[in-house]
Amino acid sequence: MFRLRGVSARFHRLIHTVSVNRDQVLEQLQVCSAEDHVFDVVGKNKAKLTADHVGLAVITLWGFQRDKPTLLRTVELIKNHPQFLTLRVLAENKFALMDDDILVDSLYSFLRLNVDCHDPLIQQLVSEAWRRLDKLPMTSLSKFAVCLNEQGLFRNPLLGRIANIVDQNLSSIDDARILSTFLITVSSMVSPRFRDALISRVDHLLDKTDWPQASNARRVVQFLRHIKCTHRPLLEKCSRILICEIPTMDVNHICMLMGLFRSLHFHSCDFKLAVKQRLTEEIDSSIDPHAFTALLSLAPFASPEMRNRLESTAYILADEFNALQVMDIAEALQQMQSRNFILIKKIASVIQRNLDTYRPVEVCRITQALFMLDYWNLELFTKLRNILVRFLERSFLPGEVIMLTRVLSMLPGPRLQEVVISRLNAVVSQCCFEDLVTISFVLGKWMRNDPLYHHQSTTSEYVRLLQTLSCRGLERLQTTDRLNLLLEELKYVSGEWFEKMILEDTMATLHRMIDQINWTNLPELSRIIAWTNWFCPPLMDRIASVAIKDIDKIHPSAIYDIMLPFSILKYDPEGADGFYDTCIKRLIPHISSLDPHLVVLLASVLALAGYFPEELVRQIFNIDFLGKLDADLEVLPDTRNKDTRQRLMEFNRAVCLECPELQVPWTHDRYCKLMLGRGKASLSPVQKQIHTMLAEVLGGIDFVRAAEVTHYFYTLDFEFILDKHLKPLPHSKPGFLQISDEGKIHWSPRSLENIRTELPPGAQRVCIAFLGYKSFCKNVQHMKAASLIRKRHFEILGYRVVQIPHFEWYSMELSTPDAWKEYLRKKIFLSASPEGLND
């Protein structure tokens, strides 16, 4: 990390200060070309060695080692050399006479040469540096902070003093390397104010540096990961710097950076494409197990052909992997969703040989990877289960207990009620919301699968623990008073228990802290409202007002999250046009700099709200953009890839239907036919019931079609035709989707030209849309945008739309077949009459 250029300059200055006698020992140390030369000089001049000589010798020894590849370093040979012991003794005796810079450089070098951090020499050097702390130059202070980190002193008061010194002198630090080092070392000591100041300063220095180094950018990303801060402008800047270095970067460093970006939920299309290119170049040259392990972790970006080659190499090298490498290989195979069961079996056999060497977290990672790979070996899973149980019985760390319990729930085997319940009861009071949700999920799974669940004692144990979870969750909500901390906990929380037991109180707590909403926490709060489907106008009005006020401070990529709940829940805040116009004006100048898949998501959210900015539409339906989007999709995870393709199709359909003046062509026929061909849908019980009732109301099964496909590939629940006298007309042609006796739906491919037939004068097409609970907000009967936009599009296509909300169909008033049929008659015929329309 640190170079010798500064040390060399200091010793050149020492030479010039000697006016009469030349320092021959110093000159000999400066011209040494190998470790043996250094030890020769030390051995021949023991009596002449000064404190500065000792420091230079140690620093030079580490310099030779640092310049070698990791596998060729001989640190242990140096550490055991007799003259190295001489240097240690002399350093212990002369440390008080060392120059400030030499003192810190010597401490750093001794640690790098594997001298134990509890060694008296290290303790004395640390104490002396501590005594001189206030006068150390920033370069030495940053290196001293690194030394403290390497000793595991992450929250030591000494680091607190260093953080205070950095805070006081932040504006005078002009070296990005020094500041990025401080970012890593004091990350556990930063307050929100100090964090923002550090981010602002390093952002400025990265721009100012003529030749920004990849190591500086990497340390900045590590700092953001340590403080769990996704600062997108800074991450994008670091990503651009790192992309330039990828062709020469070590594969292990690339792998580490990918892990950092993934943990920060930061996606950069250009960075991933550069990684993919590097993977292509390295795929045939990595035969070392250590390098290949890192290479395989990048396989999710590889093409199918490249994945096959990587899997073949993995099989050849399998027996050479050590315990940790084979664990990483198993996880890489899981991430790339490998179905090479011969390779998986081979990797599992190597894992089985090393089971006794793994720590609890590693056993959990292995078990989860094998489970997700659908590899079932009863003997191996029995051993894994026994190991997990042993770890659980003696574990007292809340996070570890939750992790072990969650992984145990994946495995088959006898009941573990007593040991699991006792451990969970012991740690539940220390659990965060994410842990509470995990416990509730595991309990629910065991309750469903436990054959003795209905036994009174078993039931009471489960129920008591679930009640404890609810009490703990409510207690955390009642005692929390900081919105940002609550949002951080809620980021990954979901599930049935949370939604039924805690969600309402959670939203009430968020409403209680409404005054703490500011532009920095808008994206996180908006995401939570969107995925919970909770309709809360006061919170959303506050989000909109803050967004309008501080829109220039919000990164363009965060606009998607902020608009999401308004579009999904179809809520127009006060001055809705002002809110959306403000967001659109913020987005448009930056469209070209955003990742293509994010542009598609932004467009789809705006379309849900009924906004189609022409600049955005033109940008998306452009050959160059679509080419970039194809490249972006290649490096996206499969689920996000599929979601983006679906959103693009829906946006294309919405533009064609609602903005015909833009003359955007419909380009998704092939995609939609492919999706229909893959579909394995069937009518739900309620749809079968409605289908039967409609046939009776309309006069026969020939008068109604189920699952009919329209132009632009919308699928109607039910369709029929009424003439001008409101008499049902029979369908003359079979529909696209045919229904079997079992209720299965099969697509019948035929020409799209024949979808629509001409209607008799005055006739109308009617479609029935059943609206399930997902069509409404969770807490109120407020219809969401997806159902409203479907209705609007059906009407554009020439249908009269009759919607049947689930709460009406399942109401107490409609509890008999006659009542359901009368309900349908009123919906169909009364609303179609002039009087009904006026009503």
Image (spheres, grey):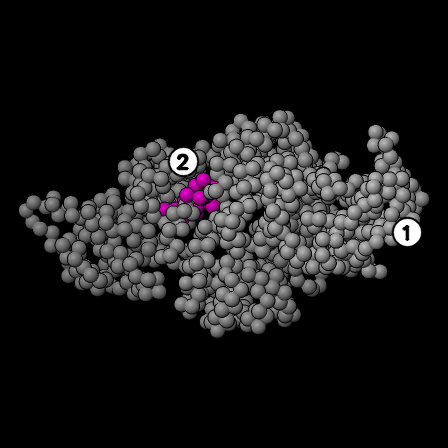
Label 2 CA crowd tier, 10 Å (few <14, some 14–19, many 20+): few
Residue 402 circle label = none
Residue at image coords 32%, 41%? 209
Range covered by the magenta-colored residues: 215-237
Label 1 CA crowd tier, 10 Å (few <14, some 14–19, many 20+): some
Pick whichever of labels 1 and 2 is earlier in the sequence.
2
* Left or right, 452 with reference to 201: right
* Left or right, 113 with reference to 647: left
Is 226 part of what is drawn in magenta?
yes
Residue 534 is at least partly visible in this image: yes
Q: Position of residue 293 (x, y in %)?
A: 46, 64
Residue at image coords 30%, 50%? 2
**Secondary structure predominantly adopted by residues drawn in magenta:** helix
* Left or right, 374 with reference to 4: right
Is 607 part of what is drawn in magenta?
no
Q: Position of residue 795 (x, y in %)?
A: 74, 40
Residue at image coords 55%, 33%? 583
Q: Label 2 is placed on what type of residue?
A: Ser
Q: Nearer the viewer, residue 607 or 290?
A: 607
Q: Nearer the viewer, residue 517 or 615?
A: 615
Residue 815 is at least partly visible in this image: no
Q: Secondary structure at mark 1?
A: loop
* Left or right, 508 with reference to 18: right
The residue tagged 1 is: 700
Q: Label 1 is placed on what type of residue?
A: Gly
Residue at image coords 51%, 62%? 303
The residue tagged 2 is: 200
